[in-house]
Amino acid sequence: MIAAIVAGVLVIGGGAYALTSGGGSKPHPNVSASGGTQDDKPHNSEGKVAWTVAAPKVSKAQLVAPTAGQWFDGGDVIKQSTTAVTAYDLASGQQRWSVPSPEGDTCADATDLVSHRIAVQYGTDCENVMVIDTSAGKMTWHKPLTSSSGSSGESGKYEFMYTDMAISGDTLAVTWDSNTVSFQVSTAKPLWHSNAGDNCSDAGFAGGARMVEVYKCGLDSDPPYHVSLINPATGKPTWTWDAPAGTSVTNVISVNPVVVGISAGNDLITDVWDVDGGRLQGKISLGKGGDGQSKYAIQCPSNNMTPCRNVAVDGNTLYMATGIQSGGSATDGETNQVAAFDLTTGNPKWLSKNPGTPLDVVGIQGHAVVAYQEVAYEHGGAIVTLAPSTGAISPYLKFSDDTREQEYDAYMPGINDLDEGWYDNTFVLSLTEVTDNGDYKYLMAGLH
């Protein structure tokens, strides 16, 4: 029952990511960020950049504005901008609706869309949260974030700088500073929360099909971490797994099964473990390459539990892109591979062939791995699929050389600042943050 009584947070939040190496993408296993399943369907084998959305301007005073939120619902892609959340038609890029921030800018967001609902933090000091009905294009409710002591944003703008949120079922959980609160998504009714003086604090939550809570207890400098699968409505745990001493739980990669990122000895993710059911099963080490960085290009946020990119989970298999290697066919000579692991044992299943240009793991369609083969100076990029049993690469959607320049501009920020989504045979690239230097042309681009 830790979630129902535990004190709020170990500061969790916004747009900083711990990059182990290489590229990355949204990790939702069988589902897109909206929660909609991706089935293999008839499709075109050739595509192009079909539409773009210009990047908004950011004031010199603000420097960096978070725009991480990206969700899919029906025929729409929904994107967080600096001051609003806006839906665009997936086929044409035309705006469908827009919900402006009631006050100030948008801030952190809940990664998952559940039952046509999303949650976004906003305000001059990011001190409020709003829930949006994506089927109606309207804000359902908004509330200030109030601490367990009853205060609401009184400690200034830094109190809400690092916030983690998750939606599962009809519950929104929010954790920041030393507080955790939860609301019924449909009514805004307060549910469970932390209590002042508790010995445990939340590190964050992951949502979607299930809700996972990560917390730590004790006042030492290196308190032990715990992972619980919880009932979203009550905050009570179904099971709890205790991390070994000397390790920390940095991220939740999947909620079904529950797969977590582990750090052993530093702040960066070093291992991926399957702890579903409260039992440690497969352990996968990210290892070290020749340059001292991880062998695998999984990229996870340093201040949030989700989303990890360039990784996907389907059943008992984990898929990750390897780090960038030399020997590619494009001008820059870079390439990589995709690796599959058995989560039950931690053993490798296969390693794909070198495709000539780097691959970013985007997600799962059916049971095949969907990957983006990066745009190059000489030609457009492509969507490919990898067979789950062998890793054999098959072409799926080749993007035209005629729109290569737009595709290159859309991908230019690199995976540090990009989200990659695959939904209804459309590939979407979008910025996770916008800076005041105006280096990037597009907030978002749709390719199909």
Image (spheres, rainbow, N blue to C red):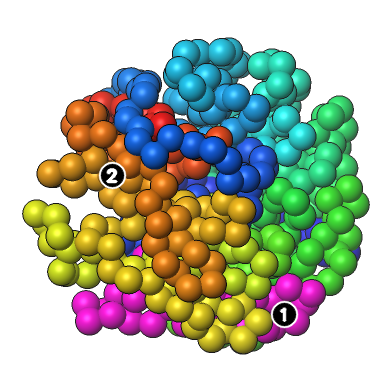
Q: Judge left or right: residue 311 versus residue 399.
A: right
Residue 306, position in %: x, y? 57, 54
Give the quarter of the image for residue 167.
top right
Q: Tell me the tag on residue 37.
A: none
| Along the line of sight, the residue nearer the viewer: 301 or 287 | 287
Asked which secondary structure carries label 1, the reply is strand
Residue 361, position in %: x, y? 43, 57
Q: Which residue: 70% across, 50% down?
A: 207
Considering only order in the chain, which callout, 2 or 1, is on the residue closer to the N terminus? 1
- Characterize the magenta stretch by its predominant secondary structure: loop
Q: Tell me the tag on residue 242.
A: 1
Where 104 sits versus 1, above or below? above
Q: Which residue: 38% across, 71% down?
A: 352
Residue 7 visible in the displayed image:
no
Label 1 and label 2: CA atoms lie apart by 43 Å
Q: Which residue: 62% across, 86% down?
A: 345
Magenta stretch bounds:
268-297
- Which quadrant is the C terminus positioned in? top left
Q: Nearer the viewer, mark 1 or mark 2?
A: 2
The residue beneath circle 2 is: 381
Q: Judge left or right: residue 136 versus residue 260.
A: right
Q: Is residue 289 magenta?
A: yes
For the view shown, which residue lies furthest in the left direction?
Answer: 331
